[in-house]
Amino acid sequence: MRRKIYFLLFFFLCLTSIPLAAQDIEIKGMVTEATTNEPLPGVTVRVKGKDTGTVTDMDGKYSIKANKGNILIFSTIGMKQIEKSCHVRNSNQCIYGRR
C-alpha cells in the first residue's frame, strides 16, 4: 500500500513539473538592415509553428515571448525572410539581410 502511495505521489510530482520546463522567456531585440545598420520598422517577428507574433517599432525594436530553443521568423516586404533560434535568455539582436 505504501509503495502504491509513493508511486502515485512521484507520478503526480512528475506531471506537475512538466509545465515548468517549457516556460516562456521574453526576448527583446532590434532588427537592423545588414549593409547600413539602420533600424527597420514594421518587420514582423513570429514564433515558428505558433500564432505568437509582433511587429518592430519605429526604432526597429521588438519584444516577444517564446520558449528557449524556439525559432523566430523575421519577415517584411522586399527583404529575405530570416529564421533565428532562441538561444539567448535576455536579448536576441538580429542583423536582417537584403534579398
Image (cartoon, grey):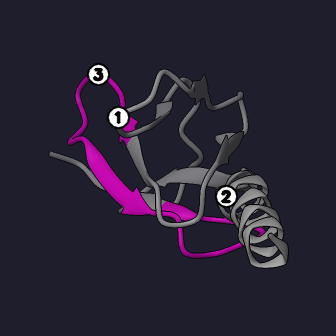
Direction from residue 57 to residue 13 in the image, left or right: right
Q: Say whether disc 3 or disc 1 marks the residue closer to the N-terminus.
A: 1
In the orientation shown, which residue stands out farthest toward the left? 99
Disc 3 versus disc 2: nearer the observer:
2
Label 3 residue SS: loop
- Looking at the image, which is closer to me, 23 or 47? 23
Q: Mark 2 points at which residue?
A: 18
Q: How crowded is the residue under tag 1: few (<14 C-alpha within 10 Å), some, or many (20+)? A: few
Task: Provide the residue span drawn in magenta.
Answer: 74-94
Percent across and percent down for residue 24 are 72, 50
Percent across and percent down for residue 36 are 45, 59
Q: How far apart are marks 2 and 1 (CA)?
A: 20 Å
Disc 2 versus disc 1: nearer the observer:
2
Q: Is residue 62 visible?
A: no
> What type is the residue that disc 1 sits on?
Gly
Disc 3 versus disc 1: nearer the observer:
1
Q: Name the residue under label 1.
A: 49
> What type is the residue that disc 3 sits on?
Ile
Q: Which residue is drawn at 35% across and 34% down?
A: 49
Is 8 rendered above or below residue 89?
above
In the orientation shown, which residue stands out farthest toward the front? 1
Q: How far apart are marks 3 and 2 (CA)?
A: 39 Å
